[in-house]
Image (cartoon, helix red, strand yellow):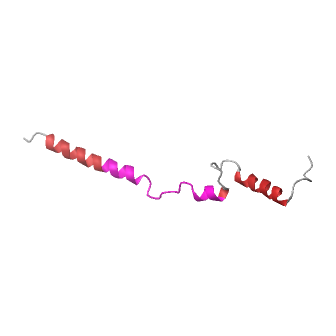
Amino acid sequence: MSESHLDEYDRYNFEYDKYLYSGHSGKQRSKREVSEHTNHFDPSGHARKIVTKLHNTEINNKKKEAAKPKS
């Protein structure tokens, strides 16, 4: 196919689309935008889950102590 009918702007658009619609970028983002808007590593881990678990364990232990018959 001859590209003699394309001007410099058409070629620019084709080149730009190649990067815009590149694999696995999603939502028509460029590769730079995808790398900026990704999930980042959290060094504290699952802190919310751990705190909730410890809090619930403490409450359950207090309930058991209160329900235990005293001798």
Answer above or below: position of 65 versus 36. above
- Residue 51 or 32: which is nearer the viewer? 32
Coordinates of residue 24 in the picture (x, y in percent): 66, 47
Query: Does residue 17 belong to the magenta stretch?
Result: no
Which region is colored magenta? 32-54
Query: Number of marks in the image?
Result: 0
> Residue at 14% across / 40% down in the picture?
68
Coordinates of residue 39 in the picture (x, y in percent): 53, 54
Query: Does residue 45 belong to the magenta stretch?
Result: yes
The quadrant holding residue 63 is top left
Q: Does residue 5 appear left or right of residue 30 in this picture?
A: right
- Residue 22 or 65: which is nearer the viewer? 22
- Residue 51 or 13: which is nearer the viewer? 13
Q: Does residue 14 appear left or right of residue 37 in this picture?
A: right
> Residue at 24% across / 44% down in the picture?
60
Q: Report the quarter where the C terminus lies.
A: top left
Q: Does residue 67 appear left or right of residue 26 in this picture?
A: left
Coordinates of residue 2 in the picture (x, y in percent): 92, 49
> Residue at 25% across / 49% down in the picture?
58
Residue lying furthest left = 71
> Residue at 40% across / 54% down in the picture?
47
Answer above or below: position of 6 versus 67. below
Coordinates of residue 7 in the picture (x, y in percent): 86, 58
Answer above or below: position of 69 versus 33. above
